[in-house]
Structure formats: structure tokens, C-alpha cells
């Protein structure tokens, strides 16, 4: 049995109209990932905790929110670092 690649293939045509197979992107759009869901839920929990918990002041709330945002941006950057966009390469 032939082994299949985990990377999806995209069929495109070059300048002369010939079919050309290109590798597709490796990652999903941000809104389709669990990273975004976890980020939104965790952010909401921190912001709510900042409102209702005594001793958890606004400075700490926004500091933890900022840490979450930085972590999310780094995780998305790492996820996208190995991906290719075949449309951008042909331009």
C-alpha cells in the first residue's frame, strides 16, 4: 500500500497552463484552533477573577492577561513558522 503524505496537495496551473502540484499550508486558520478557544476562555477567567476576587488587583489582572496574549502570539508564530503559502510563492 502506498504511503500518503500528511501535507495536503493543492493543484494549480503555471503560466503555460500546465498542472502543477504544490504543497498546501500546514496549519489551520487561527479561529479554527483550540489555541484561540483556550486563550479566550483563560482571558475571560482572569478578567472575571480580577473583578470578583479580593486581593487580585487590576495590575495583576492585566499582567496575567498580557502574559496570556504573548504566549498565544508565540504559539501561533511557532505554528506558522514551518508552513508555506503556495499562492504567495508564485507571485
Image: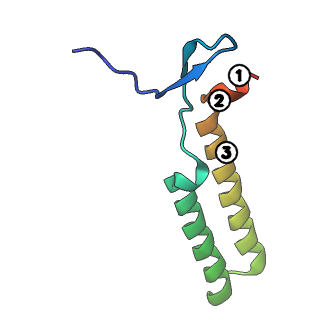
Distance from disc 3 to disc 1, alpha carbons, whole Å, reads 24 Å
Q: Residue at x 55, y 15 (%)?
A: 19
Q: Is residue 2 left or right of residue 33?
A: left
**Picture coordinates of residue 64, whole percent (x, y):** 68, 66
Say if 57 sits above or below 16 in the image: below
Say if 87 sits above or below 32 in the image: above
**What element does badge 1 sit on?**
helix
What residue is shown with label 3? 74
Q: Residue at x 57, y 58 (%)?
A: 36
Q: Residue at x 54, y 28 (%)?
A: 24
Which quarter of the figure has residue 42? Answer: bottom right
Q: Is residue 37 left or right of residue 57?
A: left
Q: Is residue 49 shown to the viewer in this render?
A: yes
Q: Which mark is residue 89?
A: 1
**Picture coordinates of residue 3, whole percent (x, y):** 30, 17
In the image, 22 versus 69, the foreground residue is 22
Asked whether the beta carbons under mark 1 and mark 2 sit within 8 Å of each other, the answer is yes
**Picture coordinates of residue 32, whole percent (x, y):** 52, 53
Distance from disc 1 to disc 2, alpha carbons, whole Å, reads 7 Å
Asked whether the beta carbons under mark 3 and mark 1 sit within 8 Å of each other, the answer is no
**What element does badge 3 sit on?**
helix
What residue is shown with label 2? 85
Amino acid at each position: 500500500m502506498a504511503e500518503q503524505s500528511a501535507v495536503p496537495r493543492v493543484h494549480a496551473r503555471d503560466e503555460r497552463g500546465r498542472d502543477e502540484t504544490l504543497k498546501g499550508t500546514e496549519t489551520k486558520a487561527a479561529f479554527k484552533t483550540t489555541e484561540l478557544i483556550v486563550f479566550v476562555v483563560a482571558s475571560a477567567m482572569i478578567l472575571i477573577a480580577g473583578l470578583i476576587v479580593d486581593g487580585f488587583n487590576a495590575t495583576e489582572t492585566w499582567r496575567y492577561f498580557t502574559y496570556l496574549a504573548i504566549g498565544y502570539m508565540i504559539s501561533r508564530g511557532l505554528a506558522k513558522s514551518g508552513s508555506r503559502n503556495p499562492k504567495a510563492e508564485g507571485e
